Structure formats: structure tokens, C-alpha cells
Amino acid sequence: MPTEIERKFLVAGDGWRATALGPGLRLRQGYLPNGGAPEAPVVRVRLAGKDGFLTIKGPGLLSRAEFEYPIPAEDAEAMLAALCIPPVLEKTRTRVAHGGLVWEVDVFAGHLAGLVLAEVELASADQPFARPGWAGQEVTGDGRYQNNALARAAAMPGPGPAPSP
Amino acid sequence: MPTEIERKFLVAGDGWRATALGPGLRLRQGYLPNGGAPEAPVVRVRLAGKDGFLTIKGPGLLSRAEFEYPIPAEDAEAMLAALCIPPVLEKTRTRVAHGGLVWEVDVFAGHLAGLVLAEVELASADQPFARPGWAGQEVTGDGRYQNNALARAAAMPGPGPAPSP
């Protein structure tokens, strides 16, 4: 079963733009209802520019099974409008080079305008990596920053809420 | 948005085998958790012989939006084993000719052995159709006979429980 390892950080400032690998890609995505249990798989519908995707993610915050399939953009549009939990999450994703790895920086819009998150995908949970200066507080283990939780969150200005103690 | 209209019946006897359009196809399918609300879309993972499919169905018993995509069989196997609500539903589906339409007769196995259901797909909710002699009680409006409910049902021998009053 394919597995992805991701680490996620709040972003402070615009320093990441200096090593951006091209223009950002506009993403619109939503989630099908899953009952909200932490162990329930997540089904994501995404429009990335003009491409549609359907993704099933198994439970777990750091390491998890993921299955992704391309689907027609019009199917994604219809599912976002009719089947996903509102509001649809909107963000612009930019690929950014740092320390030999490619990071993804997400600038949120809509109800989450002001929030900026960065993610880096690793080959294993203990792979060392260079943390950029613009990467602030790590939120990998914080379920509030999973996209399916963000989709349901109220407006979250600035760098986001303080972490739980 | 594509829509399918289906009517569903309990099956009495083996009369349908006389006009079967070939051997049956073995199906194994399961459902991702959706919280169980009647209006929640259903995500089905299916192995049909050696072919995998992922299907998203919108709410509603008679007319509903459906999106279906082929996926690798090994993905379907993995999702059935790790992500779907157990038990996996097993049945053999046979296409049967009657009155100029093609019916699908499902003979269940596993925890639902003894249950036989027939479905016919119509172009519109009011399309007339010839009801075969082997088609018993109609259960189109009975949520207990939706596959996602059957997957969770206890053993259901014979023609199934009496309808609610």
C-alpha cells in the first residue's frame, strides 16, 4: 500500500517566494462526509487548475495510506458543489526549493484567508531535512491543520491559533 | 450530473436462470465510513472479477447521482481489507433478459447467504417495464436493501425480513 510521510509548518513572511519553482497552482478542494471519527478514511475531491482528482487517505497524521485517481474536472466540480461538506477549501499551492527538497507552500483564500502552511514530503519518518527560515511552528501532529479539519474551521487569520499545551 | 434510476425486488425461485445472459460475475464490495446519515454520499469499493472500481453515490433511494471510476484491482483489495467497514459484501451478479430489458440478479454469499435480489435500471422514474414472475416483493424504497446497509446487516436468510408496516 503506498504511503506518504509529510511534515507541516506554519509559514512566517514571504521569504519562500525567492526560491519558488514557478507560479502557484490554484486548488479548490472539499471532503465527503466521513462521520468525523479520527480513524475514518478521508475522501477528498480536488480541482487543481483544470484537473480533477479523487483521493482516499487512510487514518493517521504522519504516515498514511493514500490512493489518488484523476477524474474529469466536471465530475470534481459537481461533487464539490453537491456532495462535499461546505465550505470548499481554496488555496494557491507553490512549489519551493530548499535544501535539496521541494516544499509546497499553500496560501489559503476564502474563509481561511491569512493562513499560510508549508509541507515537505519525506521518504521515511526519520529522514533529515533542512528547515527553511520561513518555516515557523511545526503543526504535523496537530489535527486542526489537516485540510479536512481546515475545511470545517471558522476563519483563522494570521499564523493560526496557539498550539494546545 | 449523471443519474441512475433503479428498481429493486426480492427474488423467489430460480426461474431467472432460464434467460441468463451468461455466467455470473463474482463481486466483492465494501463501503468507506460516511457517518451513516441518510443524506451522506456513499463511497463504494468494488472488485468485479479482476477489475477494481471506486463509486461515489449521492443521497436518495430511487434517483441519485453516481460517479464511477476504474481503479487498479490491488488498490481495491487494499481498501477492502484496510479501509472499508467490515464485513465485505460478496455476491454473484448475473445479467438476465426479460421484456426487452436487462435485469441484474444478485445471489449473495457470506453473511447474507440465502438473499437474492434483482434490479432493473430505467431511463426515467415512470418508464413502464414488464415485471418477471420471479420478481417478488419490491424493495426499492426500503433502505435495508441498499448494499451499504446490507454490508452492515446481520445474517438474513431466505427472502429477507417482512417490510415495515
Image (tube, coloured by chain):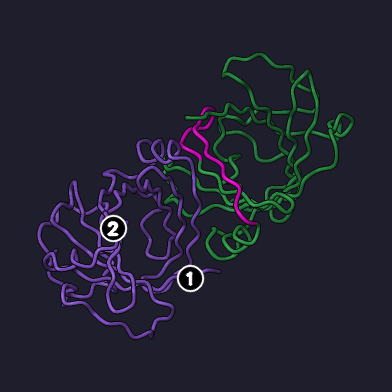
Chain colours: A purple, B green
Using the image, determine if residue B83 lies above or below residue B29: below
Residue sitting nearer the eye, A120 or A145 = A120
The residue depicted at 29 percent of the width and 79 percent of the height is: A99
**In the image, which disc is placed on residue B117?**
none
Residue type, numbered disc 2: Gly
Q: Which residue is located at x 37 percent, y 72 percent?
A: A121
Picture quadrant where residue B99 is located: top right
| Chain letter of disc 1 in the image | A
Task: Report the disc number at residue A3.
Answer: 1
Q: Position of residue A56 (x, y in %)?
A: 47, 57
**Image position, residue B60 (x, y; %):** 48, 32
Residue under pointer 2 = A22
Residue A36 appears left or right of B88: left
Nearest the eye: A44 or B89? A44
Q: Secondary structure at mark 2?
A: loop
Identified by mark 1, the residue type is Thr
Look at discs 2 and 1 and give the one toward the viewer. Answer: 2
Specify whether residue B67 is painted magenta. Answer: yes
x, y percent for residue A34: 41, 53
Q: Is residue B156 left or right of residue A104?
A: right
Magenta: main secondary structure: strand
Alpha carbon distance from label 2 to label 1: 27 Å
Q: Secondary structure at mark 1?
A: strand
Q: In which quarter of the view is residue A104 placed? A: bottom left
Q: Give yes or no for contact between labels 2 and 1 (Cβ–Cβ under 8 Å).
A: no
Rendered-image quadrant of the C terminus of chain B: top right
Q: Chain of mark 2?
A: A
